[in-house]
Image (tube, grey):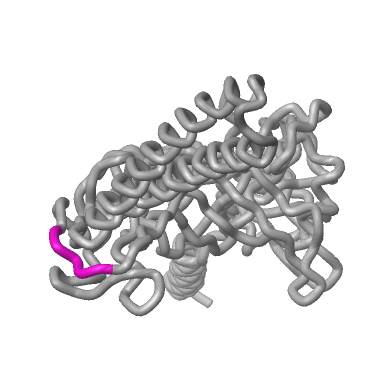
Amino acid sequence: MSTSEKNTADQARHHKRGAHRAWVVIVLVILIAAAAVYFMMRPKTQTAPLPVVEVEKVDVSDVNIYGEYVGRIRAQQFVEVHARVEGYLQKMCFTEGTYVKAGQTLFVIDPQLYQAHVNKARAQLNKAEALARKTKHDLDRIRPLYEQNAASQLDLDNAVAAYEGAQAEVTVSRADLTQADLTLGYTRVTSPISGYISESYADIGTLVGPSGGKSLLATVVKSDTVRVDFSMTAIDYLRGKDRNVSIGSDNSGSKLKSFVTITLADGSEYPVRGQVDFADPKVDPKTGTFSVRAEMPNPDRNLLPGEFTKVRVLLDVREEAIEVPTRSLVMEKNGAYIYVVRPDSVAEKRFIEIGPEVGNNTIVERGLAKGESIVVEGFHKLTHNMKVAPVVAKPKASTDDTRKED
C-alpha cells in the first residue's frame, strides 16, 4: 500500500471515529434533556395539611337550672258583685272597664219599697217607746199604792208585766228598724274591693235580686298583683330535696328561694320576676303532679287574668359547674364523647358523663377539667390521636338567664 493510500485510510478511520463520537454526544444530550424534562414535569409529593379546628377553653361557673311548665294567670282577688235585695235596677254609677275604689257606689236599686219599710219600722218603734213610757208611769203610780196597801199584788204584777212587755216591744221594734235600714242600704250596691270592674251584667230596668231576679251584676278584679298556677311533676319534687333552692317554703337550709319568669302573649319575656309562695304538700295520684303558685307584680296590667303562659321556674343552682356547647358533643349508643386537644395539638376522643341542657349548652358531670381545650367546630373530620391545627373560637355572648345572679 502506497503512502497516499495509507493516509487516505487513516483519514477515513479518523472521520468515522469522529462521527461516532458526535452521535454519542447527541444521544447523551438527548438523554440529559429528557431527564431534565422528567424531573421538571414529574408531580411533586405534597405533605397533607393538618385539619383546622376551633377550640374553646373549659371554664367553671354557677349555672341556673330551670324547668318549663304551662301556667294560667289569675287575679289576686276576683269578687262578684251581687244584688242582695230584690227590685228594679234604677241606676249604674260607673264606667265599664275602669278602676273603682272599695265602697264606691256601683248600682242603685229602686229604694221606695224599702224606704217605706224603714218608715214603718220607725213608726212601730215610736209607738213601742210611747207604750213603754206609759207603762213606766203606770208602774210608778202602782208601787206607792201597793206599799200603802191601796193596790193589790195583782195590780202590781200586771203593771210590772206591762212595763217589761213594752220594753221588749221597744227592743223588737228597734231591731226591725235596724234591719229595715240595712235592707234599704242594700239598694245601693257598692264595690267590696278596689280594682277594675267588668261590664254590667244587667241593664237598667231589669228586675234583680237573690230570689226571682238576676243576682250577678258585675265582677271586680284586683290585678296589680297576679297569681300564676301551674303543676310540677313529683320527680321535680323528689330531686328538690338535695337542691340549693327552696320551692314554696321557707327552708332555712336552702341558699336561694325559687323565682319564676313568664312569657307574654307576643312571645317576649315578662321583665319582672315572681316568687313561688305556695307548693301543695300532696301529689295528685291521677296526674303525678302537685300544684304550685307564684305571685307576679303587675303594675302596668300587662298580665291578664285567665290567659295561659309558659312558666320558667328556677329548680337548682349548680355551683362551679362545667358546661360545654351542645353542638360540640357527639352522641352514640355507648354514650357521649367530645374531642379534647392536648398541649401537643393532638385531638383525643374522650367519653364524658353529661347532665341537663341549659340553653345552648350542656352541663358535664364527669370527664372534663377546667382549663382543657375542647373542639367546638370541625370535629366531624377527626379521629382519635389525630394531629390538628387548633384555632381559638370567637367568643359568643352568653345568655344571662343561665348564670347565677347576685
Of the 4 image quadrants, the one containing the C terminus is top right
Left or right of residue 344, residue 313 in this image: left
The spot of residue 124 in percent (x, y) is: 35, 49
- Magenta stretch containing residue 245, yes or no? no
- Of 66 and 165, nearer the camera is 165
- Who's the residue at 43% across and 54% down the image? 78
- Who's the residue at 79% across and 32% down the image? 251
324 is higher (above) or lower (below) than 109 = above
**Residue 391 in view:** no
- Of 248 and 311, nearer the camera is 248
- Of 43 and 15, nearer the camera is 43
Q: How many marks?
A: 0
Tell me where residue 373 sits by quadrant.
Answer: top right
- Of 364 and 22, nearer the camera is 364
35 is higher (above) or lower (below) than 276 = below
- Who's the residue at 56% across and 51% down the image? 312
369 is higher (above) or lower (below) than 206 = above
The spot of residue 60 in percent (x, y) is: 70, 31
Q: Which residues are magenta?
A: 87-91
The spot of residue 228 in percent (x, y) is: 52, 53
- Who's the residue at 18% across and 57% down the image? 96
Q: Magenta: predominant secondary structure element? A: strand
Quick one: which residue is furthest to the front in this view? Answer: 150
Left or right of residue 115, residue 401 in this image: right
